[in-house]
Amino acid sequence: MFSNNFGSASLTETKKVLCTVCNKAKGIYTCGGCSQIFCPKHSNDHREELNKQLEGIITNYDTIHQNVNQQAQDPRKHSLMMKIKEWEEESIEKIHQAAEKARNDLLNNVGNHVTILQKKLKIVSAELKQGREDNDFSEIDLRQWTEQLEQLTNDMQNPKNLVFQRDFMPLVTNIRIYRVYSTDIFERVYNGAKIEDNGRSVTKNNGGHTEVRGKNEYSVGEYAFRFRIEKLPQNGWIFFGIISKTQPMAPDSFYAASSYGWSNRNQTYTGVSGRVLSSGKTLENMENDTITLRINCDQRTIQLQNARLQRTLELSIDLTKCPFPWQLHLNLHEANTEVRILD
């Protein structure tokens, strides 16, 4: 806990200057923090205001410190727990609604099915009654009635016109909790781009393909990196993915044998040298988009998510094509393109 024994501001004596507050020629102190000049009275007022601000900061610290301690003692009080609970309740409600609709549909169809069975039974009943009264039946009639009753029993237990089927699209989407790491930086470029802001940003000012590599290497664990496309011309081309560290750098690195990832224009790259897969699934990234690239070395997969489109794509990585260690891999094409790694 902080002590209340704080030292005074650094004040330098001056002569024949005006007080910042009252504008009178009796200012004799200059605050070492804000460089304003005060008379004795307003110097004390200024010091009191600084003390109030400090107390506010200390109060804020105490609140945060208390919350951190509470979370350490009971991790279930984490704010994300509420989001998980909301997802759980929404998912249960969706399941309840789907089940109730299925029950109602079944009841409606069963009612119609039972009506049909009753009509068929009525016909068989009439035939049986007539055969008994007339004593006019043979083995053929008995076999026919038996088969009709067996068919009715089967129709009742396993109706052919009622089918239980699961939809191809899941009713409830899964959720995941993962830590977003953004400790990587851009370290190397090939063919005309500039790394700035201590590796957090890469800018391209000329045309033609340019490879960009991250600094770190990934062989074990799960990681996620967030990028912001600061600049991208309309209909511009940009690639996000991974590449094996052993792969030599090249302008058209997206064509490399160990390159996995996605670019605009419906292009997917899956570790096949010189080939592009047009899969029908793409993320047409645009200027100001936030992109998340997830790397799962243990599952040998990568995912690309566009926050604006709320879409996620996934690729499985063949280690024979893209051996560990992996590195972040971007490729830029148009001039006036800029990408930043977000914190």
Image (cartoon, rainbow, N blue to C red):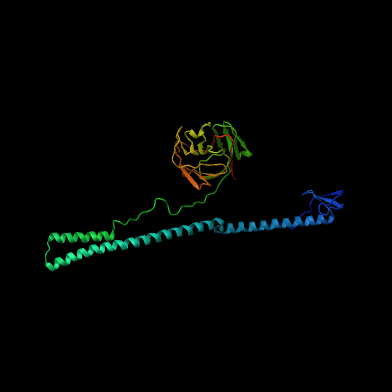
Identify whether 88 is placed above or below 205. Answer: below
Q: Would you identify the image quadrant in which residue 194 lies?
A: top right
Tell me the residue at 51%/58% (across/down). 86
Q: Is residue 133 left or right of residue 24?
A: left
Identify whether 314 is placed above or below 133. Answer: above
Position of residue 320 measured from the top left corner of the image (x, y, whole percent): 44, 36
Q: Nearer the viewer, residue 209 or 120?
A: 120
Quadrant location, the N terminus: bottom right
Q: Would you identify the image quadrant in which residue 79 lies?
A: bottom right
Q: Nearer the viewer, residue 130 or 278?
A: 130
Tell me the residue at 19%/59% (across/down). 147
Position of residue 111 measured from the top left corner of the image (x, y, whole percent): 31, 63
Tell me the residue at 68%/58% (across/down). 59
Q: Would you identify the image quadrant in which residue 118 lies?
A: bottom left
Task: In the displayed orientation, state which residue is furthest to the bottom.
Answer: 133
Position of residue 176 measured from the top left corner of the image (x, y, whole percent): 50, 51
Q: Nearer the viewer, residue 314 or 102?
A: 102
Q: Is residue 130 left or right of residue 182?
A: left
Tell me the residue at 61%/58% (across/down). 67
On the question of residue 87 being in view, the answer is: yes
Q: Nearer the viewer, residue 112 or 26?
A: 112
